[in-house]
Amino acid sequence: MHNPRSGLSLKTALVFLATCLLVLGCLGAVAQPPGPGGPGLERNDKAWEMEAKCVAQEIALSAELTTKLVDAYKTARDSYMTAAREAMGEGGQRDYSKIIELNKAQAAKLETALNGFLKPEQTTKAMASLGTFNRQWDRMVTVLDGMKLDGKANTAAMKSVTEFVVESGKVRQAAVAGGDFQSLREKTAPLREKLDADLAKVLSAEQVTKWKEETAMRRGGGGGGGRGPGQPPAPPAAPAAPAAPAAPPAPKPAGK
């Protein structure tokens, strides 16, 4: 179907909407408590450091290169927050066209920085996760950190979360490229189920419950549940069924 006035095809509109949803996932489209940097854009240096160190371990970096990776990633996240704030209009409204461009630009800046001290194949692996600027990842890492896991359990948990970030990122990118954001939920759900199952192998039952409660995506107002980053909005609620017509009044008894 085509709108002759706007010149915008339905497929083009869907691709644009999917791209906006992807970017909102990176920015933390779900409601977040206000903090430094504005709503949904607060700093989380500890989570960023943990994420970078996990990636450094995966690509076998030395202590010196690990420090450089942490510094480069923190700088990139700071730069991303600054650019994201500038892309917002009054009242925190997002200019989607600017956000789409800044997402590409900031990822390119990080990639250039990493190429300054990593091998090309190391940069590619690092960018698969660090280049997503994923705030859901921040939240997950923060929750794991609060559990104070021992070294082996923490390493396994962080690795599983990083793998989830990479794989879910691939799904969202494919959805944007194909304009098929309707399938995002069904394709992302198994990835989250696998993540929860993997974590259940290293967490206690109580920790698993805490994990699921605290990493559930939140809708506006910070409530539990909701849809993950990059997923399409929930369909509108079905209209309430019309009330049944009132019963006709009972016939009056015949007069005497």
Image (tube, helix red, strand yellow):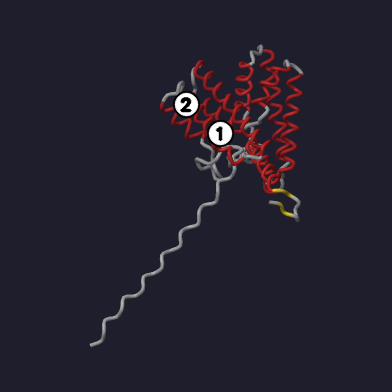
Q: Nearer the viewer, residue 7 or 94?
A: 7
Q: Residues within 10 Å of mark 2 (few under 14, many from 20)?
A: some
Q: Residues within 10 Å of mark 1 (few under 14, many from 20)?
A: many
**Amino acid found under the numbered disc labelled 1:** Thr
Q: Quadrant of the C terminus?
A: bottom left
Cα distance between the residues tagged 1 and 2: 14 Å
Name the outermost residue toward the top: 62
Image position, residue 64 (x, y; %)? 69, 13
Q: Give the mark nearest the N terminus, 1 or 2.
A: 1
Quick check: marks 1 and 2 in contact, CB under 8 Å? Answer: no
Residue drawn 64% across and 13% down? Answer: 60
Residue 100, picture quadrant: top right
**Amino acid found under the numbered disc labelled 2:** Ala
Q: Nearer the viewer, residue 85 or 161?
A: 161
Residue marked by disc 1 = 188
Name the outermost residue toward the left: 256
Image position, residue 131 (x, y; %)? 68, 28
Q: Vertical placement of 51 versus 33: above or below?
A: above
Secondary structure beneath label 1? helix
Image position, residue 186 (x, y; %)? 54, 37
Q: Which mark is residue 67?
A: none
Q: Vertical placement of 146 versus 175: above or below?
A: above
Q: Nearer the viewer, residue 210 or 244?
A: 244
Residue drawn 75% across and 19% down? Answer: 115
Residue marked by disc 2 = 197
Image position, residue 85 (x, y; %)? 71, 40
